[in-house]
Image (spheres, grey):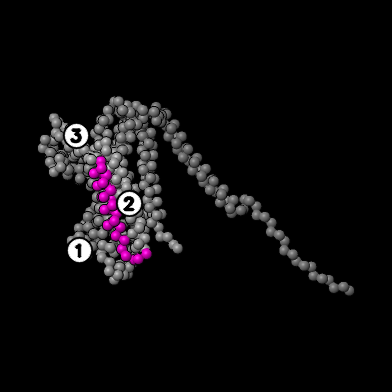
Amino acid sequence: MAERTPSRLTPSAHAPVPFWRDIRVIQIFLQIAFVVLVVVFFYALLNNLVTGLERSNLPIDFGILTRPFGTQISEGQMDFNPGESSNLQALWAGVKNTLRVISIGLVGATILGILVGVGRLATNALIRSVSSVYIEIFRNTPLLVQLYFIYRGMRLVLPETLRDSIELPGSIYLNRRAVNFPLIRGTDSVTILWIGLAAGLAIGIGLWIWRLRVQERTGHPANVLYWFIPSLLVGGAIGWLLSGGPLSVQSPELKGFNFSGGDRLSAEYLALTIGLVLYTAAFIADIVRAGIQAVPYGQIEAARASGFTQSQTLRLIVLPQALRLIIPPLGNQYLNLAKNSSLGIAIGFFDTYNIANVIANQTGQSVTLFAAMMAIYLTISLIISLVMNSVNYFMRLRER
């Protein structure tokens, strides 16, 4: 009887997974469903808003931006004519005033914040104590209260009438309304000065790069500022001499009931800018202090052992490493300063928010104007974020 050979067991091929059980298909379906739900939700809200406004005889109408603006703007654009200029021109004037505050505020807050942050770690007890008190006061009090305090203080200290204005050297006049100061204008030959400055800047950048390469090759300090600043000054001096007087100065003079000539900064602009600088600098100072303390102390000791001075250690060893930690939260403070500039309405500053609010009260188009304001502030914030992200990418630690 023949032996029965055992049948060879062959594994059966796996059946394909149905698409409704495929995890990748499920993930894609859920994401698409979520996006659809979000779009439907916001469409329902917008449709409900539009329908409600139409029932109230207040339909959304961006055509109101072409209507004449009936209020005098006493800030920035002095040639603005109420009744002749449109609401769009008025809103643009407010945007320019906002940008003036933000640009000066960012520079001032950065410089003051770095100084206070370094002073917070100073070995001198007086500097360290003053820096600490400043940080605690301005970080722990509301910005709106600070703005009122600064603005009311300026109005109490400065003279009320223009004839009693405090005169400072250089034809600078202080009063409750504004600070009047000489206006510097360029003549026809100012282009030669700009060419000289541009040439000095280009040479200075080239020397900067050269000194950094020398430092990498020899190990000696680059001292880039000792080469960059003189080249810039020499280029500017040559441009000045060749142009033969490229600038003219127009001083303010009191004629009648107002100053004629020169330039001015209103009390509202000064109060808002000073308040934003002092408030934001307190937060930047703590960021700088934390970034410096994050650098290992052993590197500071190694720099001292190598003969570096305290300023060289801070500039060449500590700050380049601390910047990688400082820049991300610094960008957040820049965004806060840009958005906090809208508080200028509390002291009567004609910025984007204040002018948009006036237009909304005149036309009844609150939704239209607030949508325009959101777009304006969103654009400003995105530009600041883009710049800070680019700086952060440039300062990142590159691995070999």
Q: Look at label 1 and name its amino acid.
A: Asn
Q: Residue at x 36, y 38 (%)?
A: 373
| Residue 55 coordinates in the image, percent (x, y) | 42, 28
| Residue 177 coordinates in the image, percent (x, y) | 18, 37
Magenta region, residue range = 217-243
Comparing labels 2 and 1, the label whose residue is closer to the camera: 2
Answer left or right for 135 relative to 14.
left
Res 381 quadrant in image: top left
Residue 377's tag is none
Disc 3 and disc 1 in contact, CB within 8 angstroms: no
Between discs 3 and 1, the one toward the N terminus: 1
Q: Residue at x 31, y 61 (%)?
A: 222
**Alpha carbons under labels 3 and 1: distance apart:** 46 Å
For disc 3, the marked residue is 261
Q: Residue at x 27, y 69 (%)?
A: 307
**Alpha carbons under labels 2 and 1: distance apart:** 39 Å
